[in-house]
Image (tube, grey):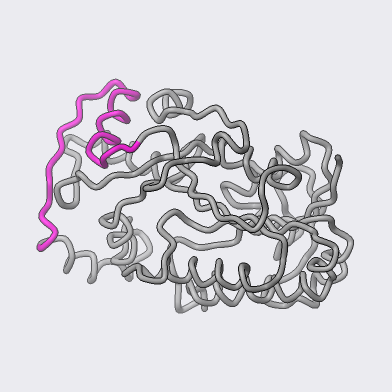
Amino acid sequence: MKMRIFLTGATGYVGSKILAVLLEQGHEVVCLSRTNRTSGSGQPVIGDLLQPETYAESLRQCDAVIHLVGIIREQPSRNITYDRIHVQGTQTLVNACIAAGFVESGKRFIHMSALGASAKSASTYFTTKWQAEEIIRKSGLTHVIFRPSIIFGPNDEFVNMLAGLVKMPITPVIGDGRYRMQPVSLHTVAEIFVKALSMGPVNEAFNVGGPEQITYNDMLIEIGHALRRNVRLVHLPLWFMRPVITVMERFPFFPITTNQLTMLLEENICRDGTPFADIYQIQPVRFREGIRQYL
């Protein structure tokens, strides 16, 4: 069934892929954007997530919402914070959907959270992601929430950043590097978001990871193999790196923040398995094979 989808975050890394899949399947896509620039052929609606009057009419004409807007790093000087984007932004969009009759009509609200989202996390990123989930759960909207782990694919930020480290004569690792992740391919993430528009259970949240849990050390080694380079890991103790990061995180060029370090050390794995793969009939992509297609 062809649908008219309201998509936020369409110009982002995940959003541009989801937009492409939606268009390939014949859906009509309305993209909320601050400018008239969208990747692909989505119909841009010039507006601001926090100003619902700029997109309310377009939202009423849509059959479902895919909400992807989020940030990984705060910029307080520009009023870009986790609370404002994750919590206030989601609350505003949810309110707009309610006003547009989404609850009564059962139109689906598909939301991107993050693996690790929790009210008890030491990371503000994760706690605000959890608060956004709670807003959706309590809204009465027919919803599906996905919590992806690290997403890898062409032009990704994380794996390509690690590839840059691997190309150095020695590769620095914060701590022992044994903290685990469960990287998931961009293709998998896009596929489940689009499938969730019309199939699978509703009012559920799914952790989304790849078919394997990998330590940070092993991720670097696998990236080295893909690049045909020998990797020399040098482990930097946490007691040394924490104060360095605290001082340096204020500079945009510095690759990691205190909040991101906290997320890294908490691990990013699906502790209860990956039932989404069976529900949405997904063929898992292993990290080793996936990165060889683009590194």
Q: Is residue 22 above or below residue 34?
A: above
Q: Where is residue 175 in the image (x, y as percent from the top left)?
A: 15, 52
Q: Give the range drawn in magenta.
A: 213-239
Looking at the picture, tell me which residue is in the foreground, 196 or 173: 196
Name the image quarter holding residue 181: top left
Looking at the picture, tell me which residue is in the foreground, 55 or 63: 63
Q: In this view, does 280 lie to the left or right of 167?
A: right
Q: How many marks?
A: 0
Q: Is residue 61 left or right of residue 155?
A: right
Question: Is residue 219 highlighted in magenta?
Answer: yes
> What residue is shown at x 85% (from left), y 47% (from top)?
3
> What residue is shown at x 33% (from left), y 38% (from top)?
213
Name the image quarter holding residue 159: top left
Question: Is residue 51 highlighted in magenta?
Answer: no
Name the image quarter holding residue 228: top left
Question: Is there any visible trace of residue 231 in the rendered image?
Answer: yes
Q: Position of residue 79 (x, y in %)?
A: 52, 78
